[in-house]
Amino acid sequence: MSTKNNNKIEENGLVEYQVWDKTVRIFHWVNVVLITTLMFIGLIMMFKSELGISGLPAKIKLKELHTVIGYMFAINVIIRLVWGVTGSHFAKFASMRPKTADVTSYKNRLKKGENPQYLGHNPIGKFAVVAIMALSIVIMVTGLIRAGTDIYYPPFGSAISHYLAADNTDPALIKAYDNTGVNLEKKANMKPYKSVAGDIHLYSVYLLMLLILLHIIGVVLAELRHQPGIISAMFSGKKSIAGKCEDSFE
């Protein structure tokens, strides 16, 4: 049996809703893989000496690998940003606006033993998603900046190599971590900005790791205590709701 919105009514009285579209689900799981991979490579870069990795070629290869996967991450984030404006109802960022009043109300209802059901993210989940997306953008931008300053990779690498090139030096001949043909005064002037981008990148990743951990804990708790099926929904796109939904497709 189906409702007028093509939502399937199951034998146990639950109503099945198609909530997450394919683009949202693909973005989510691709992001999981890419972030995990980038963090793993980043840790290798940070502790390469302890791991017995030495020499400039190895350092550059790790940076290049991190950058290439970073491009995939950036493309994935950009697609999600576009889809957040043009996609289906619950894919749009307009449906995810976090409100502290909603969080307070949600927590109070949980304390009373109620289990408010949501098609999209619950009020706490909205804060988590918005924070993770914001940090992803910061990490993407600062990562691209460091890819340009460190190994002269696009989109900023060409401009940076032209800026750093000494007089009568072809910018294309400048090599990563090599001062040959580099205007050392300009390099020194750029260093503070490079360091700021690197620090923001690093500490944003640390904060993202913390948020992801809290997000996973929150999702598992919500799955076990309040709204079963929210994890499987990110695979199938479907949620089964008992009773009234606190949000809608409108």
Image (cartoon, rainbow, N blue to C red):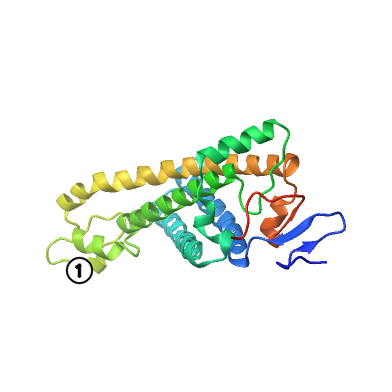
Q: Quadrant of residue 23?
A: bottom right
Q: Position of residue 68 (x, y in %)?
A: 45, 62
Quadrant showing the N terminus: bottom right
Residue drawn at x 75%, y 59% as measured from the top left: 16
Q: Is residue 9 above or below residue 204?
A: below
Residue 129 to residue 65: above or below: above
Pick the front one: 117 or 150: 117
Extreme residue toward the top, this view: 111
Where residue 176 appears, x then y in whole percent?
A: 31, 58
- From the viewer's side, name the closer residue of 17 and 32: 17
Furthest residue toward right: 11
Q: Residue at x 22, y 50 (%)?
A: 190
Give the residue type at disc 1. Asp
The answer to whether 152 appears left or right of 59 in the picture is left
Residue 21, compared with residue 246, is above or below; it is: below
Q: State left or right for residue 15 relative to residue 72.
A: right
Q: Position of residue 10 (x, y in %)?
A: 83, 59
Q: Which residue is disc 1 drawn over?
A: 170
Front residue of this view, candidates 149 and 20 = 20
Dot 1 crowding, Cα within 10 Å, few <14, some 14–19, many 20+ = few
Q: Residue at x 59, y 39 (%)?
A: 214
- Give left or right: position of 120 versus 172: right
- Residue drawn at x 70%, y 31% is 112
Where the C terminus falls, by quadrant?
bottom right
Q: Is residue 44 visible?
A: no
Q: Is residue 15 visible?
A: yes
The answer to whether 175 appears left or right of 162 in the picture is right
